[in-house]
């Protein structure tokens, strides 16, 4: 499974990237706002930092304007994935941009039918939003499973990018089902290392070590 980090914070990306935990980055208008940075400037910096795809999102609502924005974003670096919403205009933009050889991430997917349309339009990635479905008492993992089944049935090459990841259990479940990629905030990825029994065992080891009176260095 590939790990994308869902942030526009350079320091957080760099820390995970140094550990080999970053296969790509996803951003959106909200994350750009939180960073306080210019979208073109910060996106270029992220692209220079990581080797994998960096999703940069259009903000236009109509297809022609999405295509124009997508081309401008794609010109930032070769590893840009243009992010478009799963609307009819977004699908039109996806078809054109993917036809030009650009990576396209179709976002805000909430149904298997939407995912099927995105694959037909040539999407590189489809981003189903797990957490937001959970918020309205629907099972986001059922959507991941449905998309996986449909894509496998017909050999679609569009990668399932599980998004709106809120917990480490979301990551485990998405991996079990067979999502190609997850994108999660840095804090959630780092929380994967945590377990109370690890903490308890380490505490015991340190107490016993202190009793020996020894040092390694």
Image: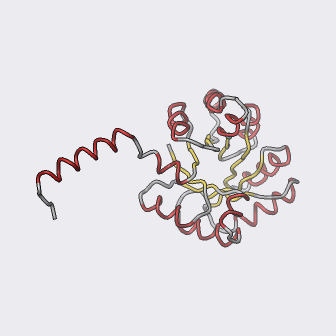
Relative to 72, residue 94 above or below: above
Image quadrant containing the C terminus: bottom left
Give the colour scheme shown: secondary structure
Near-viewer residue (137 or 100): 137
Rendering coords of residue 114 (x, y %): 76, 36
Picture residue at 61% right of the left edge, 29% below the top: 145
Circle count: 0
Q: In this view, does 199 lie to the left or right of 84?
A: left
Q: In this view, does 201 lie to the left or right of 196?
A: left
Rendering coords of residue 13 (x, y %): 53, 61
Near-viewer residue (109 or 31): 31
Relative to 175, residue 51 above or below: below
Q: Is residue 100 left or right of residue 79?
A: right
Rendering coords of residue 163 (x, y %): 63, 44
Near-viewer residue (117 or 87): 87
Picture residue at 53% right of the left edge, 39% below the top: 171
Picture residue at 47% right of the left edge, 47% below the top: 191
Among the 4 quarters of the image, the one containing residue 155: top right
Picture residue at 56% right of the left edge, 44% below the top: 181
Rendering coords of residue 101 (x, y %): 69, 55
Among the 4 quarters of the image, the one containing residue 182: top right
């Amino acid at each position: 499974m590939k790990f994308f980090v869902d942030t526009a914070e350079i320091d957080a990306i760099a820390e995970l990237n140094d550990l080999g935990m970053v296969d790509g980055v996803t951003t959106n208008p909200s994350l750009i706002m939180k960073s306080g940075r210019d979208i073109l400037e910060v996106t270029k910096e992220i692209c220079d930092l990581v080797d994998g795809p960096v999703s940069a999102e259009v903000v236009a609502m109509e297809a022609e304007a999405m295509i124009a924005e997508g081309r401008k974003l794609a010109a930032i670096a070769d590893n840009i994935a243009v992010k478009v919403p799963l609307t009819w205009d977004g699908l039109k933009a996806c078809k054109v941009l993917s036809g030009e050889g650009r990576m396209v991430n179709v976002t805000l997917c909430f149904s298997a039918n939407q995912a099927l349309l995105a694959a037909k339009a040539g999407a590189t990635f489809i981003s189903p939003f797990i957490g937001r479905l959970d918020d309205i008492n629907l099972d986001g993992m059922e959507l991941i499973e449905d998309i996986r089944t449909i894509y496998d049935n017909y050999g679609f090459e569009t990668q399932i990018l599980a998004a709106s990841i809120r917990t480490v259990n979301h990551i485990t479940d998405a991996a079990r089902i067979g999502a190609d990629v997850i994108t999660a905030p840095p804090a959630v990825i780092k929380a994967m290392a945590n377990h109370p029994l690890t903490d308890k065992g380490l505490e015991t080891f340190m107490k016993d070590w202190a009793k020996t009176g020894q040092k390694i260095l």
